[in-house]
Amino acid sequence: MSVLEAEYFVERGHFLGKNGHINGRLVKERALNDPHILRNLVIQLCERTVEYSPSLIVGQKNAGARLAALVGAKIGVLSLQLNKPSVDTSVAPPRISLAPLHKERVVVVEDNVTTGRSIGQIKQSLSGYGADPVAVVTLFNSGQATAERLGVLNFEALLDPEITCWPADTCIPCADGTPRSLGMLATHRTNG
């Protein structure tokens, strides 16, 4: 898919996002809820994933784990769902019983990479079992992520929706007088 096709998954506007003002909102549901689109995207994820000869596919709950399971089933590789870390840091989540993974070729499959925080959490969970991902493969790269920024050897995204984020005090659309769109205000609150 090309960058032009990535636009299908973006609602353009001037939104208040989690980390500042953004020029578009990713609408992942268009990919994840349409069986025809999802099937085509999973095929493309599989093509990228098999290049790394994985012995284990890992995804973080919910959408990432769903994609990891679909990719794993299609290429005949075991998939593993990692839970998101608990918000309450005083209660450690129970460790799952896994044999050491240091010999596994782990590929992380994600739905979207924005800040890389989820990838960091996945890497931390895997390191507890002696594993380090050989690659991260994602549907969307909406945060200009790179392998270097994520601290992984290989990073591939099917689609780059080219969503730009500005701090509220240096927002270009604000400076141009563009009013903010209402699409994300109900779900994302920041100062500015």
Image (tube, grey):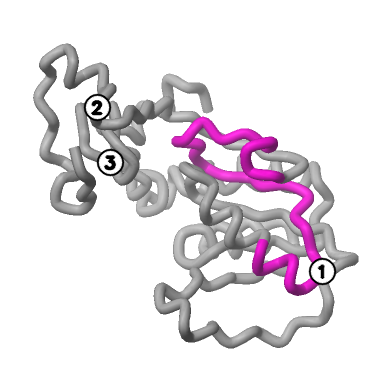
| Front-most of residues 25 and 190 | 190
| Front-most of residues 129 and 32 | 129
Residue drawn at x 50%, y 71% is: 85
Q: How far across and how far down the image is residue 125, in percent?
A: 65, 69
**Tag on residue 17?**
3
**Tag on residue 130?**
1
Which span of residues is magenta-colored? 124-151
Q: How far across and how far down the image is residue 87, in percent?
A: 41, 73
Q: How far across and how far down the image is residue 46, in percent?
A: 67, 47
Q: Amino acid at mark 1?
A: Gly
Is residue 171 on the magenta stretch?
A: no
Residue drawn at x 49%, y 39% is: 140
| Front-most of residues 4 and 61 | 61
* On screen, residue 20 above or below 108: above
Element on which disc 2 rests: helix
Which one is in front in this view, the residue at disc 2 or the one at disc 3?
2
Left or right: residue 1 versus residue 31 is right
Element on which disc 3 rests: strand
**Closer to the N terminus: mark 3 or mark 1?**
3
* On screen, residue 132 above or below 43: below
Residue 158, by quadrant, is top right
**Tag on residue 15?**
none
Q: How far across and how far down the image is residue 159, in percent?
A: 51, 32
Q: Which residue is mark 2?
A: 169
Q: How many marks?
A: 3
Residue 148, by quadrant, is top right
Cα gap from disc 2 to disc 3, whole angstroms:
14 Å
